[in-house]
Image: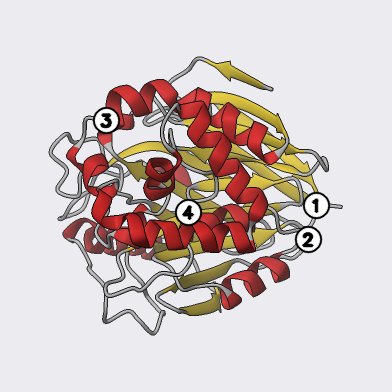
Amino acid sequence: MSEVVVAELGWVRAAGSPYEIGFALGRAGRGAVQQRLRPLEYWRAVTDERHQPLVTRLAGRTQALFPEIYAELEGLADGLDLPFMQVMAWNCRGDLMSNVPDGCTTVQLPGPTAVLAHNEDGLPELHGSCFIAEVTGQTGAGFVACCYPGSLPGHTFAVSNAGLAQAVNNLRLRNVQPELPRMVLGRAVLECKTITEALALLARENACGGFHFTLAQAGEGALHSVEFGGGACSHKLIEGASGHANHALHHNAAPQQTITHSSRDRQIRVQSLLDAGVSDALRILRDTGGAGLPIHRTCSDDPDQENTLASAIISVNNYGVSWEFYDQSSSEPVYTGEVTAS
């Protein structure tokens, strides 16, 4: 079942079997994919037949290790009314190509109530087409996550019913030989019951394109920075106010990465604001100052082909997780919620 709320940042409810969840998410994003994504050269490049042998291998590995996520992808393809291999390729885009237009900035504020604040930056063509997915599986577990049309949940920002909070940044690692899609791993993290389980998953499975996760869990107290991809994983605790854009800061594959001007400028600007004593996370996410390219991105000629599409302020402490989700430029949250620690 699904329910769609019309807004700049929509709300979609999906429940049932993995296939039914995927189908509902596909139906929710079908118009945007058919009308906005498929005409793009980017879509054609990702779904080009030259990638089919690799996509076939990644699909097989997904089916073997994560059969429920594979079924969700099958439902997603049917809901989108597209061939499965095209949708599979689209959900492998960061594994097939290193320099994809998936941006993002995360602000990390440790403390008794830790804060993960995140701008989700993606294709400007998708402004107004992203949505929050409220997903409930057959076991009753579930999550809320920001979703792109045509994509699995788990590679943007999310909060699970287990009290696990996730904010994700693209890393442009080069010369990767993937064995599993990074977006499948992001989706798998949303099924983890504990942060220990999530960290173990990423330490075990990381032969993929590059991602950075900021993770926290209600009752656990700490903020975790995890950079993975290219067959390696680096994990560190966040001990001071910091930020993360779209390049690895502690991953051992960091020399084999592309750092765009926007990513470098946003990283510098976030840290300069924090060093100046700015503690209002939303103010940082909405910042357009500094000498370089801005944190909050709305320009049609952005050099990375990315605009801020949604933002999140997620607060985590011993008692639970509370969240505020924002449209591109709203000063007030459009959705709020909380999960109580068990």
Of label 4 and label 2, which has the lower sequence position?
2
- Res 255 quadrant in image: bottom left
Q: Amino acid at mark 2?
A: Gly
| Pick the front one: 24 or 333 | 24
Pointer 2: what residue? 219
Give the residue type at disc 1.
Tyr
* Distance from Cα at disc 4 to Cα at disc 3: 32 Å
Select label 2 or label 3 by which is in front: 3
Q: Mark 4 touching mark 3, by CB under 8 A?
A: no
- Drawn side of residue 222 relative to residue 318, left or right: left
Mark toward the viewer: 3 or 1: 3
> Residue at 40% of width from left, 69% of height from top?
178
Cβ atoms at labels 1 and 2 below 8 Å apart: yes
Residue 269 image point, x, y percent = 28, 59
Tag 4 and tag 2, C-beta contact below 8 Å: no
Label 1: how many Cα within 10 Å (few below 14, some 14–19, many 20+): some
Residue highlighted by disc 1 = 319
